[in-house]
Image: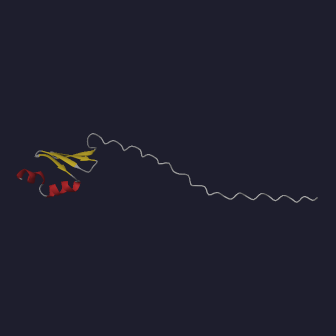
Amino acid sequence: MEETPAEPAPAPEPVAEEPPRAEPVPEPPAPEEPAGKAVIGTYDAGDNTYTMYADGTIDAETPAGRFHFASIEELKAFRSAGGEGAARSA
């Protein structure tokens, strides 16, 4: 009896692999805020001392007192309106 060559076994059907599931990665803890505001610079002009903070606010220490500004634009508007001279007469 003559042997017929064995047919190769059929290739297994490809199985769709599920993409690897990404494990949720915990976010790193937010950096702690410093106890006070972070000073980024100071500037002396005449008798005035200006302190600039990282959040954009500015403190001005003047002979007429201490002033706080929410932004440089607010400080410029204050100075344009007469500055501390106008504050004294108010």
Q: Position of residue 70 (x, y in %)?
A: 21, 52
At a point 23% along the width and 50% down the height, the residue shown is 57
Instruction: Give the quadrant of the N terminus.
Output: bottom right
Q: Position of residue 67 (x, y in %)?
A: 15, 48
Residue 75 sits in quarter: bottom left
At a point 84% along the width and 58% down the height, the residue shown is 6
Q: Nearer the viewer, residue 19 or 9?
A: 9
Q: Position of residue 25 (x, y in %)?
A: 46, 47
Instruction: State the scheme by which the image is colored.
Output: secondary structure
Q: Is residue 7 left or right of residue 3?
A: left
The image shows residue 51, relative to residue 1, as above or below, that is above
Q: Nearer the viewer, residue 20 or 7?
A: 7
At a point 90% along the width and 58% down the height, the residue shown is 3
The image shows residue 36, relative to residue 73, as above or below, that is above
Residue extending farthest front: 1
At a point 13% along the width and 53% down the height, the residue shown is 83
Q: Nearer the viewer, residue 42 or 55?
A: 55
Residue extending farthest right: 1
Residue extending farthest top: 35
Q: Is residue 82 left or right of residue 52?
A: left
Count of marks, rendered view? 0
Q: Nearer the viewer, residue 74 or 4?
A: 4
Q: Is residue 54 left or right of residue 18?
A: left
Residue 26 sits in quarter: top left
